[in-house]
Image (cartoon, rainbow, N blue to C red):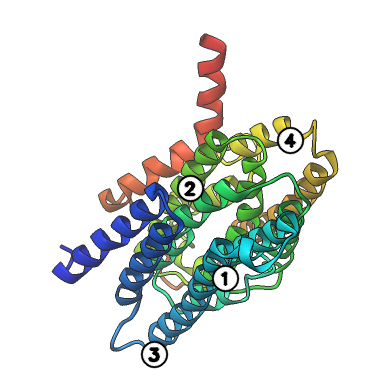
Amino acid sequence: MLPIYKILFMSTLMLGTFISISSFSWLGTWMGLEINLLSFIPLISYKNNSYSSESSIKYFLIQAMASSMFLFSIILMMFKSKMINDLFFMDNIMLMIMNSTILLKMGAAPFHFWFPEIMEGLSWMNSLLLMTWQKIAPMIILSYMIKSNMYIPMIIMMSSFIGSIGGLNQISLRKILAYSSINHIGWMLSSFLINETLWLMYFLIYSFINLSIILTFNKLNIFLLKNLFSSMNNNYMMKFFTFMNLLSLGGLPPFLGFLPKWLIIQNLSFKFFFLNLFMIMMTLITLFFYIRISYSSIMISNNELNSNPTIYKFNPNFMLINLMSFISISGLIMYSIFLNLY
């Protein structure tokens, strides 16, 4: 059972997000972001863990700086008519500043430097919160401000590039998932160029696959690649589901993670062909290190090092994880069958 303080701060965390996305004024949006920030700090700080304390301080400083810049840009927009005659130029500058502060809050490139470092000091469940729930409010706020200029496509390209290149030489699973999240931010931002419904579908599928992977890593207490190879040596079903989930997260067909990317590719090809092509190429790099991890684990076995190798027996504690993994693996196939039937 969760401690009472965690239930309290989780409630205010969700409340802050709902205030931000439903506010009628920029000041109310800023207040919701602050409530969300001040609720997340106690959740990620542990007394006996110096890494989580360091991560909580870093997260607070980054988010407080972004919030102050966001509030500053709001105040400037209120007084823009008194400061400068060229309102169109002022609008674009203020819009770029506001977009940059929101991108800093969600960890998109080139404002991503804090994100992998903070992820490294968090527990798996807090990492899941940081990669999923903490992106809802900034994403929806950003959808209000997206205009047809070149700034957002540049951010999309940089997030796709850094998210794919940054994960190549990592041995920490939390950093690999952090860089993967940066890559997915690029895809989510590109879905805003089409419609918000596609973003919602992408975000829900991404969160579901992430939940399935992180529940497995949390249950087996896995943080590094070497732990991943050794912990699942004789657990063949869990090994299969975990690596298929990773490939689904990377967007390999015919897994569920390919479905939202498939829809974005179809809709984005008409207006943003080169952006679409660039994102596909960067996703192939992301898939490369997922396939490399999966291939190494499946082909390399440590049975000869174990004096008494154990045979995997079904564990009812993993029933939910196995079910979620099965949906993640076969979701696209079920979706295709549903389309053919109806």
Residue 311 seen in the figure: no
Of the image marks 4 and 3, the number of the one nearer the N terminus:
3
Residue placed most toward the observer, 288 or 261: 261
Q: Residues within 10 Å of mark 2 (few under 14, many from 20)?
A: many
First along the sequence among labels 2 and 3: 3
Q: Amino acid at mark 3?
A: Ser
State the residue position of label 4. 268
Q: Amino acid at mark 2?
A: Ile
| Marked residue nearer the N-terminal end (2 or 1) | 1
Residue 175: image tag: 1
The mark found on residue 209 in the picture is: 2
Separation (CA) of disc 4 from disc 2: 23 Å
Residue 50 tag number: 3
Question: Which quadrant of the structure image shows residue 101?
Answer: bottom right
The location of residue 10, given as percent across then percent down, is 27, 62
Dot in front, 2 or 3: 3
Could you tell me how far apart the alpha carbons at marks 3 and 1 are, in whole angstroms?
Answer: 18 Å
